[in-house]
Image (tube, rainbow, N blue to C red):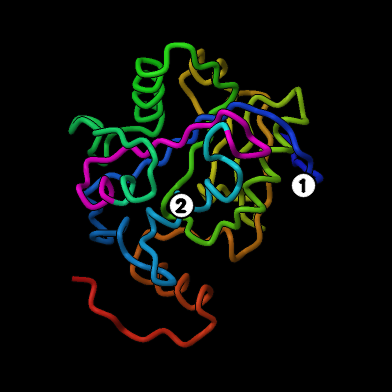
Amino acid sequence: MKLIKKGKEKKKSEKVLVVIPARRGSKRLPHKNVLQIGGTPLAQRTIQIAKTAGLNGAKTKPFLKSQIVVTTNDPQVKNIASIEEVECIDRPEKLATDKASAEDVIIHAVEYVDSLFTTNEFDAICLLQVTSPLLDHKTLSKALETFIENKTLQALIAVGPDYQMCGAFYIIKKDTFLRHKSLYPKDMGIYVLSWEESQDVDTIEDFRVCQVINDHRIFFEVPLG
C-alpha cells in the first residue's frame, strides 16, 4: 500500500464512471440517505459533490465524458437523481440487502451503463459513499488527478488521519476492477483526508457530529420521521 501525496490542480481529461450506491433499508439509521445536512439530503449532497468536482458529463472539465449513476431501490433517492438530472439504476432487491457487496453493486452498475452506452470507454470507476457528506469537491478532484498522474496505481482509497479506511471514495481502474472483482488490488494507494472530511454517517450520533461540523453551531434535536 502506498501513501499518496495530494496532487497539484491540473486540467486533465479522463473518462470516469461515478457510482453512488444509496439503498433503502438502513437498520442502524433509518432513512439515512435522505436525512438533511445543511438543508440538503445526503444522497443529493453526494451527487452535487461529484458534479462540482468535474464529474458531470462531456461539457465539464477536468474529467471529460464522465457519467454519474445512482444505484438505489429507494423512491425518494430516485426522485433526487431525477432532480439532479443524473442516471439512476433501479437496483434489484437481491443487491439491496445488507449482505450485498459493494463489488456486486458496482458490477451491476457497470453492466447497466455498458448496455446503454455501447461505445463508452471509461478508464476508471469512482465509488462515492452517501455516508461521507462532508467530503470537499476540491479534495475529490485532486484525488482523481493524483490517481491519473500516478500511472502505477491501480486504485486509490480515502482514509482518515489515522490511516483507517473511511469509505468516502474508492477510485480504481475499470479493467483492474472487472478482472479482480475487488476494490483492493495489489498496487493500491491511500489518500489522507482531514478529520472533518473523513466523517462517516452510520448512526444518529455520527449524523449529529456532521451537522455540527457543517453548520458550526450547537445541534438541536430534530425528529427523523
What amino acid is found at the position of numbered circle 2 in the picture?
Thr
**Residue drawn at 25 percent across, 33 percent down:** 91
**3D distance between C-alphas at marks 1 and 2:** 21 Å
**Residue type indicated by callout 1:** Lys
The residue most toward the front is: 59
Q: Which residue is mark 1?
A: 6
Residue range corresponding to the magenta coloring: 59-79
Q: Looking at the picture, how far across and down is residue 188, in whole percent? A: 66, 30
Residue occupied by mark 2: 46
Determine contact: label 1, label 2, CB under 8 Å: no
Residue 203, percent from left and from top: 35, 64
**Considering only vertical position in the picture, is 197 above or below 139?**
below
Q: Secondary structure at mark 1?
A: loop
Residue 16, disc: none
Q: Is residue 110 visible?
A: yes
Name the side, left or right, on which 9 lies relative to 218. right
Q: Residue at x 48, y 32 (%)?
A: 67
Residue 39 position within the rendered picture, expressed as x and y whole percent measured from the top left: 39, 71
Most extreme residue toward the right is 8
Left or right: where 73 falls relative to 169: left
Q: Is residue 72 magenta?
A: yes
- Magenta stretch contains residue 103: no
Between marks 1 and 2 in the image, the one whose residue lies nearer the viewer: 2
Task: Look at the image and tell me in which quarter the N terminus lies.
Answer: top right
